[in-house]
Structures are given as C-alpha cells and as structure tokens.
Amino acid sequence: MTTGTTGPTGPTSTAPAAADVDKSPRPPGSRGRPDRTPRAPRGRGGGGRTRRPLLGRRVNPFAGAGSLIWLVVVLVPVYTMLSASLMKQDQALTGNPLAPPSNPTLDNYNTVLNSGFPRLIGNTALVAVAVVALVLAFSVPIAYVAVRTRDRWSGLAFRVFLLGVAIPAQAVVVPLYLIIGELGLYDTLLAVILPTAAFAMPVAVIVLTGTMRDISEELYEAMALDGASPMRMMLQLTVPLSRAGISTVAIFAALQAWNGFIFPLILTQSEGPRVLTLGLFTFMGQFGINIPALLAAVVLSGVPIFAVYLVARRALINGLMGAGGK
Amino acid sequence: MGRPHPAWVLPGVLFFAAFALAPMVLAVYLSFCDWDGLSAPRFTGLDNWTTLLGDPQMHRAAGLTALLVLASWAFQTPAALLLGVWAAGRQRNRAVLSAVFFIPLLLSSTAIALLFHSVLDPNFGAVKQFGEWFGLGDQNVLGNSTSAFLAVVFVGGWQFIPFHTLIYQGGARQIPEVLYQAAEVDGAGRVRQFFSITLPQLRDTVTTSTVLMVVGTLTYFETVLILTKGGPGTDTTILPYLMYHTGFQKFDLGYASAIATFLVLTATGLALLLVRFTGFGAMRSTREGM
C-alpha cells in the first residue's frame, strides 16, 4: 500500500528519495542529500538547498546498540542456514550447530538439484512471468482511464480496487477451489496464475494511478493536437512516463507469484504444476531429518530473488515499499 | 478530446471480479451451506453460523488470533520504528547494515518458516546450543505452548520487521530537517527530539504500518502450518489455520467458509476502526491528490 508519507509512487519527485534507501556510502564531503526536500522545489534564492545536516553526525549509542542487536538476530539464522547446508548430515545432527562445517560439501545442493528442483524453478518462473503480464495488461488501462476520465463508472471501478486491497487470499480459497474445479483448471499452472494475478491487481492499480497522476495535462493536449488516439497516447506517452510505477508493479507482482503458497497448496496437487514454495513444503516431508538438504533447498529458493536484488536493488526496494504487508 | 472510453476498464474489472470478488461473494454464500468438496453444496441456512458462535475451538482460535495480533504489534512496531528512524540517518555503517537487515525480505514466508523450523529443532538447531550456553538444557521450543506461540510471534517479526523498517525509514526521511535544527537551538536533547518531533511527525506512518501489520498478522498461515501445525495441541491454531484444517483436512468446506467470512469481517472492521481513530482517511486523501 502506498501513501503520501512513504511516497514510492511518484515517478520523479518522491521515488528517488525512497529509492535512496541504501545507497553506497558517498564521499564524506557530500553528505547532505539534495533530493531530500519533501516539498515541491522551492524558488531560487534563500540558499535553502544546501542544508548541511547538523544531526546524524553525533553518535547515537542507543540506536547503534539496538541496530547491532538486530544485526545478530538477523544474521544467526542466516548463518546457520548457510553453514548447515554445507555440512554432512552426521555433523549437522551431532555437532555444535553454530560451528562452521568441518568438511564443507556441496552434496546437499546436488541432492536438492536432483530432486526436481529445476522443474520447480521453471514452473515458478513461468507463473511469475504470466502473472506480471496479466497484471500489467489489465491494470495499465484501468489506471489510465482512472486518471484520464472523470467518468462515474471508472471512479467506481477504481474504488472497487481500493476495497480489494483488504481481501485476504485465505478468505477465498474455498470458493476458488470450487470455481477452478468447475473451470477444469484444478492441478494446472493456470489455477495458480489466475488468482495470483487477480490478487496483485488492487495494489497495481493504486500504484499505477498514483504514478500516472503526475503526468502533465499539457503533454496530453500536445498529443491531442497532433491527432493522437487515446490508445496511442497511452502507449507512447503514459506508459513510457510511468516506467517507475510499472517496474514497481512488475516486481511486486513477480514477488507475489514467487512467494505465494496458499493458492498452489489448495489448487494443485501433482508434481507437474508444483511451484517452489509448495516444493519446499513437500521437501520437508520428503527429506525428513535430512536438515542440511532442506536448508540447501531454502538457500536455493532465495537465489533468484537475491539475483534480482543485486541487479535491480532500487526497483526492488521501491516495489517492497509499495507492496503492503504480504 | 482524446479521452479513453470508460469501457477500457472492463477486461481488468471482469478478470478481478472473476477471481477475487466473485469468490468473496461465493464464500459468503458457501458459509450458509454444507459442502464436503465432492458433492454439490447444500444450503443449510444459519447452521454454520450458529455452530460457529458456540464452538469452543473457534472461540479459542479467535482469542489466540487476537493475542497474536497484539503481541506481533507490540514486538514489531517499536523495533521497526527505531530501526527505521536510525536507518534514515546518515551513519557511515548504515548502508551496510541496511543491506543485512534486508535479507529476510529476499526469502518467502515458506522458506523462513522452514528455516526456523530447523533452527528451533531441539535435536539440531541453534537453539540447542543457546540452551546449553545458558544452562537451559535442550529446549523443545515448539513443543511447549507458550514458547511455540512466542516462536510464531518472533518468526513473524523476523520476517516483517525489515519491511516495516523500510516504511518508517521512508517516513522519517520526509521530516523537515528544520524542525530538528530549531529543536537543537532550543537545547532539546536526542530523546526529547524523538518524542516531540519524530514520533508526532510519523503519526500517519505508524497508522499505515499498523493497518498493514494487523491485516498481515490476521492472515499468517505458512508460518503456523510449517512451524507448529497449529500445535502443540491447538495452542497455536489461529483462525487461518483453523479455516484450512476445517476445510481441507476435515473437508467441512461450508464451515471453513464461515470461518473465512468471519476473518474478513474482522479484518475489515479492524482496519476501518484504525482508520477512524487515527486519521488514516486524511492521509488517503493526500495520496489520492498526488
């Protein structure tokens, strides 16, 4: 959910400030952030832009200590996961769980990769791509109409999506089980794709509408003078200028697809259409006490998102800020 | 002049209606039915609802859910607020630490629940070592009702605090620096500044984050399914898990729909209450005006 206060939706003014979450350290001299101004750029004069922060220089021991505690809380489980995934099973079961692996081995990763993991990744990637495509194809026109018309019905449609944010996936799995069954889609990838896309739409519409509102009316007027059709305006003006919002929405929808659990759990059954999260869950039963292999699977499940994080860090952070709870 | 026809929204609206709105309406209808998932649903009127009102298991699950929401809020909000405000500052190590804090966001709920299931395993996990260090012996955290409940609270926090930290960090960055400069001139200390400037300025952010937290906690599912399976006994059987168990393990899908409907009504009601009492409505209008 996006809000004025967190503001990751604006393409130009607010987005960079929000995206700036963990910029690499800048040179000591340039600590003030020129993009910090929350308001519209002020006029010239006054020299208000070069506000050197007086704060933040002083050490804050309490906050520092608190953040260090949280660092330990985050890192201990991550460390045990990585280290145990490299252990042989006997060390994992008898040794000190916090000790490093005595004979690091990649066997566990091999076990997982040979247990149908590639298919899980493939299925999940397919679901993610399809969900993103559906969400964008449906949400972009809705947001465009919501911004460009004052029509009562499109306003109503927009409100429906605002309300839709509040529907939890759990609430609809029973009827979806019925609907998907009636459609003959039970135990197919489409059974996962369709509801996942529908549930990503409310946030997508809200984020896209927020972004598209900032596009100036004059640009539309200029294109209208050239005789452009509404479709051409959307494709050649609105979409390119909403890139920030569109990538936020795409990442958000992809993450929903990647992490979704309850739809696959209830709407699929066999191995064919199994996705990653459900695969992890079945590994849990299948590997039993082979905890190192299980943890290797957990590590592998995070690798694709980690790769996205490295490549598109800012867009991902924006996407998460715009995502809302789950 | 050059405006799109409102009918452009139809494909998207119909799609959303088919896979989100219609199921929601159907869930309400099914809550008045008896349905085993195989034969056709049979309308039974208020049966499920009267059962629901008198069902001790339901009462217990509702109580546990309420407790989970409160405990999660009390754990996540202060932590996320402090971390977010801290991360909005300009410490040199901030960037590195923020990147580490981000790690839980890269794992799915399923992966996180599995990870903690092994960390908390009394025969294997890190908790065994901590138990030895602190002289507590082998701790079967997930086998004891209080500690299993706290484990769910903790794992949820581990997963979602980073996300709420991002929200607070964004909020804290929007506070005009001038306020702090003025406070500095007036000789206000750090703590005073936090309570007199930061906290009031973040009021709307607290509301946003709280609404997301409450609605999010009401739908914890993977965490409970994987970590505790609702146990020991039914001591962590919260409403979403009870719904799943009733519907897809006991195949009483009508009653499961009643539980689901109850859950939505509660979530919506709570969200509206929070909005009412904290001025979230005003904030939404700034968003709409953006």
Image: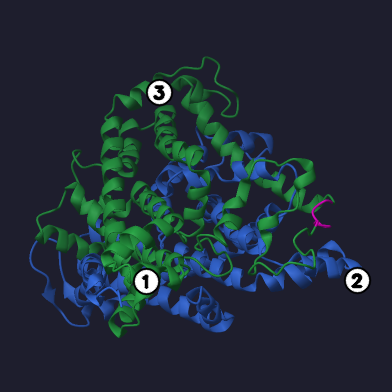
Chain colours: A green, B blue
> Few, some or many C-alpha atoms within 10 Å of disc 3 (few <14, some 14-19, many ≥20)?
many
Residue range in magenta is A52-57
Q: Position of residue B260 (x, y in %)?
A: 31, 69
Q: Secondary structure at mark 1?
A: helix
User: Disc 3 vs disc 2: Cβ atoms closer than 8 Å?
Assistant: no
Residue type marked 1? Leu
Q: Position of residue A245 (x, y in %)?
A: 44, 58
Vertical order, A124 against A3 (above or below): above
Q: Which residue is mark 3?
A: A108
Q: Residue at x 43, y 79 (%)?
A: B269
The verdict on a common chain for dots 3 and 2 is no
User: Disc 1 vs disc 3: Cβ atoms closer than 8 Å?
Assistant: no
Res B263 label: 1
Residue type marked 2? Asp
Q: Residue at x 62, y 38 (%)?
A: B131
Query: Which quadrant would residue A199 be assigned to in this image?
Result: bottom left
Q: State yes or no: residue B234 in magenta.
A: no
Residues at marks 1 and 3, CA–CA distance in whole angstroms: 41 Å
Q: Nearer the viewer, residue A68 or A220?
A: A220
Vertical order, B87 against B135 (above or below): below
Q: Position of residue B1 (x, y in %)?
A: 31, 78
Residue type marked 3? Asn
Q: Which residue is mark 2?
A: B186
Q: Nearer the viewer, residue B189 or A266?
A: B189
